[in-house]
Amino acid sequence: MHVLLLKEPRDGESGPDPYIKELASHGHKATLIPVLSFKFVSLNTLSDKLFQPEKHRGLIFTSPRAVEAVKMCLEAEERREEWNSSVKDKWNAKSIYVVGKATAALVRNLGLDPVGEDTGTAEVLSRVIIEREDTNIPPLFFPCGSIKREVLPTALRENGVPLETLTVYQTAEHPDLEKNLKNYFTEQGIPAILPRSSTKAVR
């Protein structure tokens, strides 16, 4: 059975995408076609904020792309050395919040110790943050995407937890989506299964 997955590859995973691997274990052939592309923005501003941890109470990561943006800020050797020698320890003395195991794994690769990887959603993470933080603190810093959901910022604002957001990547349709779909249908025909979550990705 042929299955077409319209989704991004799982970040922080080695080897085949877990969906493809699981389907293959049941004798199904799955093809993954990415539907989104990402453009990183405001990296100079992000870098400035990363190297001034004293101005924030902690960090929040709800997507692997935001962690990738941080990693890009550490590509210069002198920045990486400064990060490893002192800056990451200053952040680790604060709160580092994440959603999801893949994001948590990438955050650990930066040398940071995250909280919240089992929360699963921004809504659940917001409740964890509200329980742990009070209102008389410097703002938490939240590098995020251009189409982030407002669940977490709204929940924190309504409960008086200070938050500073910065858009560090923009999301758009993958430039090769149409071509890849045409090639797939030409070579494979109509797939037996197109999961509902995949169809949502291109609406």
Image: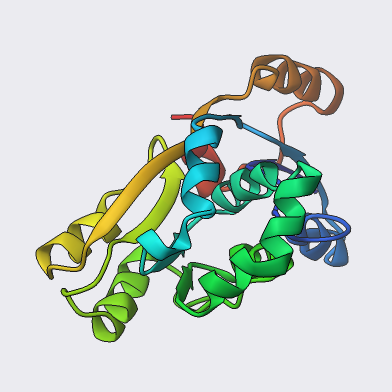
Q: Is residue 64 above or below residue 133?
A: above
In which quadrant will I find the C terminus?
Answer: top left
Does residue 196 appear to the left or right of 154 in the view shown?
right
In depth, the one of 80 and 157 nearer the eye is: 80
**Residue 22 position in % (x across, y down):** 78, 65
* Identity of the residue drawn at 48% across and 67% down: 99
Does residue 16 appear to the left or right of 198 in the view shown?
right
**Residue 7 position in % (x across, y down):** 63, 42
Q: Is residue 145 visible?
A: yes
* Identity of the residue drawn at 76% across and 43% down: 75
In depth, the one of 118 and 16 nearer the eye is: 118
* Identity of the residue drawn at 69% across and 57% down: 82
**Residue 102 position in % (x across, y down):** 64, 64
Q: Tell me how the rendering is colored.
A: rainbow
Q: Is residue 175 above or below residue 54?
A: above
Q: Is residue 61 visible?
A: no
